[in-house]
Image: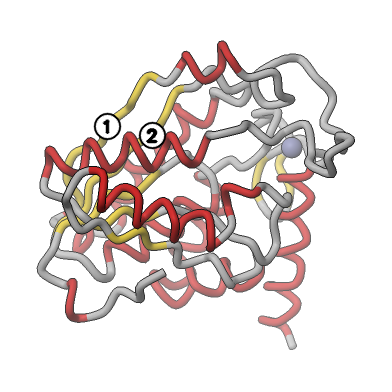
Amino acid sequence: MAAAGNAFSGERALVLLSGGQDSATCLAWALARFAAVETVGFDYGQRHRIELDWRLSFLETLRREFPDWRERLFADHLIDLSVLGEISDTALTRERAIELRENGLPSSFVPGRNLLFFTFAAALGYRVGARHLVGGMCETDYSGYPDCRDDSLKALQATLSLGMDHKFVIHTPLMWRDKAATWALAQDLGGEKLVELIRDGTISCYLGSSESRHPWGRGCGACPACALRASGWERFTAGQRG
Ligand code: ZN
């Protein structure tokens, strides 16, 4: 994906914000680069719909704690994609176990999800004048979802730009970062205060479990998303100590 730099600094970006660690870090990344930033979330009938509440409280705290960024942070949008939940038979949209399927993909894979997210984000970005679309997809430390791959998103960037005759840029700042490096990026962008806000104010758990508090934040502690988050935090804090 194209690197954001000074060339884009006067422009508007739209960040896909789910309420989890990765997209929250991407929002900070965008706020450090773009003159104006808007956010978009998707309600697709996910079992962990609790993340939709967390994203609102995360935005509220971010605005309060980071006044420099508040000036650049504009509208938040929520798009109803419940039709995706209706047609998907997956562990994120039905009461199903998270397990490996015969095709080698986990049952938590929601076919088409990120493709639809970016397509709707582009349609919204077209309207609000944001050609930069930012998402937390990553193929370094991930669940093997094909729509998180760099190649998939490069192809989508070309398709959206051609299909809307509008030059979109899809930014995925976490693509080649593992979860420990994602925490380190948050630290670089907003110091300890941002690390703590992301740790305590975001939820990545596939089951949307927020009762248990761990050193790395809240979650069931057992699902693949919690396991990735926990091991990344462990490596990040070990690096801090070392
Ligand atoms: Zn979990």
Q: Mark 1 points at which residue?
A: 77
What x and y, as percent, mark residue 10?
Answer: 10, 69
What x and y, as percent, mark residue 214?
Answer: 74, 48
Kindly indicate the quadrant of the structure image that contains residue 112: top right
Q: Identify the residue at image location x=62%, y=42%.
A: 204
Q: Identify the residue at image location x=36%, y=66%.
A: 29
Q: Is there CB contact under 8 Å for labels 1 and 2?
A: yes
Q: Is residue 13 above or below residue 108?
A: below
Q: Name the residue under label 2.
A: 41
Nearer-the-camera pick, 187 or 150: 150
Where, quadrant-wise, is the N terminus in this rendering? bottom left
Kindly indicate the quadrant of the structure image that contains residue 74: top left
Q: Can residue 14 be seen in this view?
A: yes
Q: Identify the residue at image location x=20%, y=51%.
A: 73
Ligand number 1: quarter of image = top right
Where, quadrant-wise, is the C terminus in this rendering? bottom right
What x and y, as percent, mark residue 159?
Answer: 35, 50
* Mark 1 Cβ inside 8 Å of ligand 1: no
Nearer-the-camera pick, 108 or 198: 108
| Residue type at tag 2 | Gly
Kindly indicate the quadrant of the structure image that contains residue 16: top left
Q: Identify the residue at image location x=70%, y=73%.
A: 237
Q: How crowded is mark 2: few (under 14 residues within 10 Å), some or many (20 or more)?
A: many
Q: In this view, does 8 lie above or below 240?
A: above
Left or right, 218 with reference to 54: right
Nearer-the-camera pick, 85 or 201: 85
